[in-house]
Image (cartoon, grey):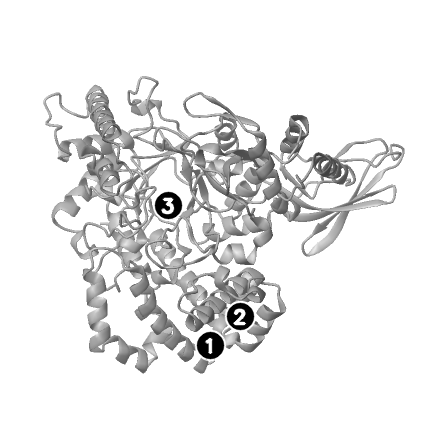
C-alpha cells in the first residue's frame, strides 16, 4: 500500500501514535510504516490509499476546528481558563456560555468579542455540562472541575499488609477466602499495628481455571466476584430451611471439606457450589417480597444502566452455556445477542427478568458484606482500612467489552516492549482503550470504574498507572517486539482521578513500575498521587540498593508484587526455578546467567543491610532466615515514604509467589493459599512474625494510632 511517510507521520501525530520510542536500555526504536498503518486502521482511520488517509487527516482537523469547545473540558480549581475555537468571521461577536448545574439553575456567562478564552465561574469540583454559542454555531461539552490534588493520607505514615482474599484459609470458609475471613484477618492485622490491609482486585471474573482466574484480567472492573460472599452470613440463609438442610447434607459437607483441604483454590468448584446456594436463597428473597425492599430498590437506582448491562450479560452467558456446554463467552453466542442494544437482548430481558435480577441481588449482597468489612477496619482503629486495586485491563471476551464495545480498540493488543525481565517483550492480550471514545463521552466509564473501586475502602492502587499516559500497542499480525506506544490525554485523566479520589476520601497509589516516562512521575507528584517503589528495583546505576533515606516521601514502599518473587523465593531463586520448570526458561546459558545475577543481587542486598546497621557482619545469609527477615522489614519501615506494606507471603516467609508471568496452566497462578490458616495466626511462628512487624511499625512511627490488643 503506497502511503507516504509524511502523511503517515501526520496521521500518527493526530491520533497519538508515537513514531519512535526509547526502551529501558536506552535504545531508540522507530516505528515502521506497516506498524503505523495497522494501528491507525485499528482506530478506524481509512488507510486504504494515500488519498483516503489524506482525507481522514483533513476530516479530523476540520471536525476539531468546527467546534467552539472540545467534547470534554477538564480543569482544576486553580486553572479555570477555557479556550474557545471561534468560527471564521466571528471575532467581533461575543460567545454566549451556559453551564448546567445539578439541582440548580444554569449559570450564564459571556466571552467578549475577540476573546479566545474565558474564565469559568467559581464552582465546586464535579461534573457539569457546558454550552457555547457564537455566529450560529452551538457546541455542547462535558465539563469536569477537579481539585488540584488527590485525597491526602489521613496519617503521615502508616504500615499495612497485602493479602490475596481468595487465598485466606479458615476452618469455616468454603475453599476460598470470603468477606468474613477478611474481617478476621483485619482483626489480626490491626493487632499487629497495621493501618490498612491491601487486597487483590475483587473484580468479577469467569472463575474458570487456568485461563480466567486472574483478578487482573477480569470480566468487569465495575462489579465484583461472588466467590467472596459468605453464603451462611446472608440474611436469607437464616430463613431458608432448605438451604440449611442442603448445607449440612453429607455430599455438601464432603465437597466443602475437600475444597478447604485442597492445596490450591479451586475456582470452578467453589463458584459452582456457591451459585447453587445463591439461586436457592434468591428464591427466598423473592418469596419474602425482597424485590420491593426500599434498600434494594435504591441500590438498583444508584447503579442504574451499568448494573443492568452487567447482570444481563451474566444471565445470557448462563443461558447460552446451559444450552451448549462448549460456549464459554459472548463470541460463541448467536450474532443477535452479541450486541447489547439489539432487539434480541431486549426481548431476553423482557422474557427472563428474574434471571437478570438475581445477578443484581448478588452484587447488592457483595456490596453490603464489603461495606461491613470496611466498617470493621475503621472500628478497629485503622486510619485507612481496606486498600483496593483497580486492574489495568478487562478480558476481551468479558462483560465490559460486550457492554461498552466502542470504548475498546479491535485489532491490537496491549503489552510491553522488551526489557531485562522479558527479553521478547510482553503480550498481555487485552484490547487497548479507545481514547477518542472516552474523550467524546466525558470519561464517564473511567470515572465510574474509579468511583466503584474506591467504594468501601480508604486507598486505591491504580495498576500500571502509565496507562493514563501511554500504552504499548501490538497489532494482531505482529509480536511483542514490533509494537509502539500510543499516548492518551493524561492531564484530563489525572483530573478525573483526583476528583473521584477527593469525592470518595480515597488515597491513590499509582503503580509506576517498568518503563516510566518522566512526565508520568511529574504528574503523579503534581496531583498528590503516591508513587509505588519496590525494594528489588530501587538501585543505582551500578546495581547497588539505595539506602532507606533515598526513597521518596510521596510513595508506598514494599518488597515485591504478585508477579515477582517473595523474599524467601528471591533468596532461593524459586522464581527462576519455577520459570525453568514451566518451560519458559529453556536456555541453559540464560538460566545460569539469571542465577548468577541473583547471587550478585543477594550480595548487594546484604551489603546495604549491613551498611545501615540492620544486619551483623557475621550474620549467616546462606538461607533466608530470621535475621534477614528482620533486617529487610526494618529497612523498608525506616524509609520516609508515607505508606509501607508487606505481602503476607513476606511476613510469613512463604517462598511461593501468586503469579508467574508468561504462564497459564504451567503454574498455579492466582490459586496460592496463605501459608497459615486464620485460626493459626495468634500463636507460634505467625504470632512471632506479627510481633516483629509490629515492633518495626512502632519503632518507625507507623503504628496504627488505635492498636487492638
Q: Residue at x 9, y 22 (%)?
A: 618
Q: Name the residue under label 1.
A: 290
Q: What element carries label 1?
A: helix
Q: In this view, does 212 lie above or below 39?
A: below
Which quadrant of the figure contains the N terminus?
A: top right
Q: Is mark 3 on a helix, strand or loop?
A: loop
Q: Earlier in the sequence, mark 2 or mark 1?
A: 1
Q: In the image, which is nearer the foreground, mark 2 or mark 3?
A: 2
How many neighbours does mark 2 have within 10 angstroms: few (below 14), some (14-19), or many (20 or more)? Answer: few
Q: Which mark is residue 435?
A: none
Question: Which x, y percent locates residue 518?
Answer: 49, 25
Q: In this view, does 429 lie above or below 470?
A: below
Q: Name the residue under label 3.
A: 383
Q: Quadrant of residue 38?
A: top right
- State yes or no: discs 3 and 1 in contact (Cβ < 8 Å): no
Q: Name the residue under label 2.
A: 297
Q: Tell me if I can see residue 372 in this picture.
A: yes
Q: In the image, which is nearer the foreground, mark 3 or mark 1?
A: 1
Give the alpha-carbon distance from disc 3 to disc 1, as whole Å. 35 Å
Amino acid at each position: 500500500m503506497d502511503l507516504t511517510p509524511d502523511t503517515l507521520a501526520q496521521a500518527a501525530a493526530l491520533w497519538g501514535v508515537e513514531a519512535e520510542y526509547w526502551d529501558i536500555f536506552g535504545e531508540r526504536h522507530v516505528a515502521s510504516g506497516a506498524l503505523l498503518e495497522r494501528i491507525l486502521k485499528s482506530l478506524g482511520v481509512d488507510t486504504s490509499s494515500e488519498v483516503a488517509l489524506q482525507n481522514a487527516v483533513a476530516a479530523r482537523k476540520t471536525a476539531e476546528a468546527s467546534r467552539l469547545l472540545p467534547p470534554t473540558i477538564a480543569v482544576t480549581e486553580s486553572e479555570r481558563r477555557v479556550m474557545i475555537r471561534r468560527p471564521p468571521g466571528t471575532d467581533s461577536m461575543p460567545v454566549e456560555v451556559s453551564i448546567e448545574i445539578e439541582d440548580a439553575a444554569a449559570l450564564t456567562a459571556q466571552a467578549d468579542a475577540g476573546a479566545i478564552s474565558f474564565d469559568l465561574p467559581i464552582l465546586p469540583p464535579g461534573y457539569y455540562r457546558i454550552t457555547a454559542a457564537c455566529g450560529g454555531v452551538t457546541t455542547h461539552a462535558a465539563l469536569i472541575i477537579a481539585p488540584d490534588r488527590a485525597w491526602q493520607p489521613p496519617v503521615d505514615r502508616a504500615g499495612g499488609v497485602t493479602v490475596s482474599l481468595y487465598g485466606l484459609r479458615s476452618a469455616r470458609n468454603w475453599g476460598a477466602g470470603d468477606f468474613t475471613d477478611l474481617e478476621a484477618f483485619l482483626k489480626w492485622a490491626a493487632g499487629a499495628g497495621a493501618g490498612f490491609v491491601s487486597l487483590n482486585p475483587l473484580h468479577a471474573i469467569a472463575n474458570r481455571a487456568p485461563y480466567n482466574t486472574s483478578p487482573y484480567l477480569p470480566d468487569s472492573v465495575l462489579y465484583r466476584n461472588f466467590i467472596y460472599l459468605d453464603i451462611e452470613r446472608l440474611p436469607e440463609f437464616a430463613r431458608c430451611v432448605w438451604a440449611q438442610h442442603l448445607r449440612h447434607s453429607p455430599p455438601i459437607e464432603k465437597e466443602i471439606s475437600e475444597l478447604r483441604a485442597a492445596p490450591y483454590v479451586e475456582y470452578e468448584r467453589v463458584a459452582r457450589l456457591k451459585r447453587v446456594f445463591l439461586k436457592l436463597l434468591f428464591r427466598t428473597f423473592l418469596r419474602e417480597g425482597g424485590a420491593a425492599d426500599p434498600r434494594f430498590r435504591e441500590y438498583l437506582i444508584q447503579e442504574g444502566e451499568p448494573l443492568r448491562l452487567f447482570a444481563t450479560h451474566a444471565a445470557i452467558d448462563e443461558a447460552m452455556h446451559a444450552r451448549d456446554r462448549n460456549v464459554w463467552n459472548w463470541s460463541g453466542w448467536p450474532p443477535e445477542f452479541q450486541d447489547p442494544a439489539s432487539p434480541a437482548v431486549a426481548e431476553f430481558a423482557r422474557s427472563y427478568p428474574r434471571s437478570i435480577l438475581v445477578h443484581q441481588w448478588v452484587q447488592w449482597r457483595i456490596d453490603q458484606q464489603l461495606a461491613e468489612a470496611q466498617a470493621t477496619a475503621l472500628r478497629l482503629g485503622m486510619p485507612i482500612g481496606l486498600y483496593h486495586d483497580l486492574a489495568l485491563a478487562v478480558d476481551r471476551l468479558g462483560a465490559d467489552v460486550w457492554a461498552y464495545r466502542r470504548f475498546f480498540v479491535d485489532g491490537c493488543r496491549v503489552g510491553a516492549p522488551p526489557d531485562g525481565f522479558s527479553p521478547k517483550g510482553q503480550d498481555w492480550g487485552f484490547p487497548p482503550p479507545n481514547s477518542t471514545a472516552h474523550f467524546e463521552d466525558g470519561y464517564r466509564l473511567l470515572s465510574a470504574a474509579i468511583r466503584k473501586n474506591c467504594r468501601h475502602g480508604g486507598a486505591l492502587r491504580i495498576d500500571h498507572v502509565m496507562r493514563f499516559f501511554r500504552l504499548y500497542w501490538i497489532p494482531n499480525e505482529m509480536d511483542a517486539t514490533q509494537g509502539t506506544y500510543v499516548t492518551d490525554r493524561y492531564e484530563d485523566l489525572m483530573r478525573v482521578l483526583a476528583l473521584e479520589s477527593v469525592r470518595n476520601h480515597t488515597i491513590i497509589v499509582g503503580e509506576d513500575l517498568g518503563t516510566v516516562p518522566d512526565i508520568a512521575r511529574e504528574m503523579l507528584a503534581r496531583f498528590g498521587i503516591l508513587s509505588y517503589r519496590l525494594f528489588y528495583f530501587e538501585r543505582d546505576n551500578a546495581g547497588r540498593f539505595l539506602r532507606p533515606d533515598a526513597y521518596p516521601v510521596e510513595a508506598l514502599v514494599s518488597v515485591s508484587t504478585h508477579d515477582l518473587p517473595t523474599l524467601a523465593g528471591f533468596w532461593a531463586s524459586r522464581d527462576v526455578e519455577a520459570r525453568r520448570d514451566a518451560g519458559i526458561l529453556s536456555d541453559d546459558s540464560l538460566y545460569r546467567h539469571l542465577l548468577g545475577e541473583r547471587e550478585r543481587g543477594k550480595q548487594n542486598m546484604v551489603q546495604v543491610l549491613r551498611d545501615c546497621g540492620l544486619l551483623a557482619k557475621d550474620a549467616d545469609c546462606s538461607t533466608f532466615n530470621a535475621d534477614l527477615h528482620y533486617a529487610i522489614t526494618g529497612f523498608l519501615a525506616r524509609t520516609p515514604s508515607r505508606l509501607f506494606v508487606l505481602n503476607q507471603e513476606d511476613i510469613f516467609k512463604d517462598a511461593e509467589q501468586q503469579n508467574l508471568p508468561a504462564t497459564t496452566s504451567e503454574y498455579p497462578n492466582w490459586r496460592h493459599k496463605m501459608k497459615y490458616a486464620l485460626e493459626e495466626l495468634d500463636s507460634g511462628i505467625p504470632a512471632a512474625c506479627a510481633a516483629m512487624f509490629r515492633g518495626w511499625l512502632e519503632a518507625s512511627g507507623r503504628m496504627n494510632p488505635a492498636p487492638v490488643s
